[in-house]
């Protein structure tokens, strides 16, 4: 296969994102994308690059994944993640994970060590433990910010100003899902997305992030997409798959497809979100209908770009 120039793009979540949160977001996505690019530059696989890029944001409390995840109504963390290999179209997904720092690595094990795509709940916890993942003491991933976000949610519910879509105020307190899309020197594409979901979710709620075609999709023949935003909306719209279809069947560029489909989703279903996309030749797409979405990418030769506002 022809040698490709490696490239990686990451996101740190779509939402309201207050000014106070911007520096932490910028710092976190920059660290993440550098880790991923270093792997690609040294000949590593796109899969390892996206996994490690996401790992770095999972342990950073500026993001809603791993440590710092949003809390459900019981005040507990329930996380979910998915990873996909664009060469084989194999995917690994997990949900209802708790007390594990790196759900994306559990997802990778599901992909590589089982004949299945998706494992959830206590069986997924058992699987993770058998695979050697450390199960942290209960509550280890809960941060003060996540507790405050849940308090805001409960208050807004009492006030009755919390409908399905208008989470604008709530959003300000949430730190944002994480994702990464990469192409390695062999032209293989991989995508990874990891989240704590949304504050005040019903225990057991499953969102878009662990679902292939919604939160994550990779296909070497077209490209890769990782999404973030209102999960119920993204799931119903199949946002990642729609962006890739726009590229495959209409010949749209990665940027055009990402913008057209993200806008169309919000127009049709109200809920907002965003996506990062790489076309199979390394073209970039970044768009969001939320106020902000933090992102960063590095392409040859070592050029780092990052941002958070719509351009
Ligand atoms: N901030 C996010 O992207 C949340 C995630 N999409 C969910 O609804 O679970």
Image (cartoon, grey):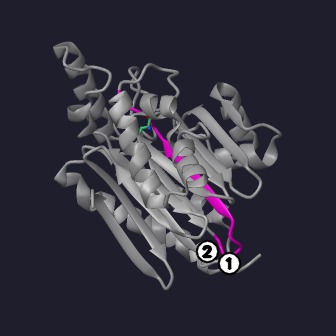
Residue 14 drawn above or below residue 161? below
Q: In this figure, which residue is indicated by the disc labeled 2?
A: 40
Residue sitting at x 83%, y 39%: 115
Residue sitting at x 43%, y 30%: 233
Residue 184 appears in the picture as rendered: yes
Q: Identify which residue, 180 or 174, lies in the foreground.
A: 180
User: Which quarter of the rendered image does ligand 1 occupy?
Assistant: top left
Q: Is residue 198 magenta?
A: yes
Mark 2 and mark 1 in contact? Answer it, CB < 8 Å: yes
Q: What percent of the width, then of the height, locates residue 74?
A: 41, 20
Stretch of the chain drawn in magenta: 184-199
Q: What percent of the width, then of the height, locates residue 276?
A: 46, 55
Q: Is 160 positioned to the left or the right of 48 in the image?
A: left
Which of the image's four quarters has the C terminus?
bottom left
Q: Is residue 188 magenta?
A: yes
Residue sitting at x 56%, y 76%: 38
Q: What percent of the width, then of the height, locates residue 182?
A: 57, 64
């Amino acid at each position: 296969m022809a040698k490709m120039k490696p490239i990686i793009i990451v996101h740190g979540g779509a939402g309201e994102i207050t000014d106070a949160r911007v520096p932490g977001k910028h710092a976190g996505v920059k660290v993440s994308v550098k880790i991923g690019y270093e792997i690609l530059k040294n000949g590593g696989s796109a899969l390892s690059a996206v996994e490690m890029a996401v790992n770095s944001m999972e342990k950073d409390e500026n993001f809603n994944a791993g440590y710092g995840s949003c809390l459900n109504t019981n005040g507990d963390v329930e996380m979910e993640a998915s990873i996909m290999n664009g060469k084989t179209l194999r995917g690994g997904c997990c949900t209802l994970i708790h007390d594990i720092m790196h759900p994306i690595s559990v997802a990778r094990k599901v992909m590589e060590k089982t004949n299945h795509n998706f494992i959830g709940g206590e069986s997924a916890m058992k699987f993770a433990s058998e695979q050697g993942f450390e199960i942290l003491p209960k509550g280890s991933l809960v941060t003060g910010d996540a507790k405050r976000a849940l308090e805001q949610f409960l208050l807004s519910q009492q006030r009755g100003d919390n409908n399905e879509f208008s989470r604008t105020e709530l959003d300000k307190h949430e730190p944002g899902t994480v994702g990464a899309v990469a192409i390695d020197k062999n032209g293989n594409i991989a995508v990874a997305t990891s989240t704590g979901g949304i504050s005040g979710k019903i225990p057991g709620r499953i969102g878009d992030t662990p679902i292939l075609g919604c939160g994550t999709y990779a296909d070497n023949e077209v490209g890769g997409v990782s999404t973030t935003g209102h999960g119920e909306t993204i799931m119903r719209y199949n946002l990642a798959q729609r962006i890739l279809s726009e590229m495959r069947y209409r010949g749209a560029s990665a940027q055009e497809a990402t913008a057209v489909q993200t806008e169309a989703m919000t127009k049709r279903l109200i809920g907002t979100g965003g996506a990062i996309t790489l076309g199979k030749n390394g073209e970039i797409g970044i768009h969001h209908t939320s106020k902000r979405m933090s992102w960063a990418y590095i392409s040859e030769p070592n050029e780092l770009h990052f941002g958070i506002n719509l351009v």
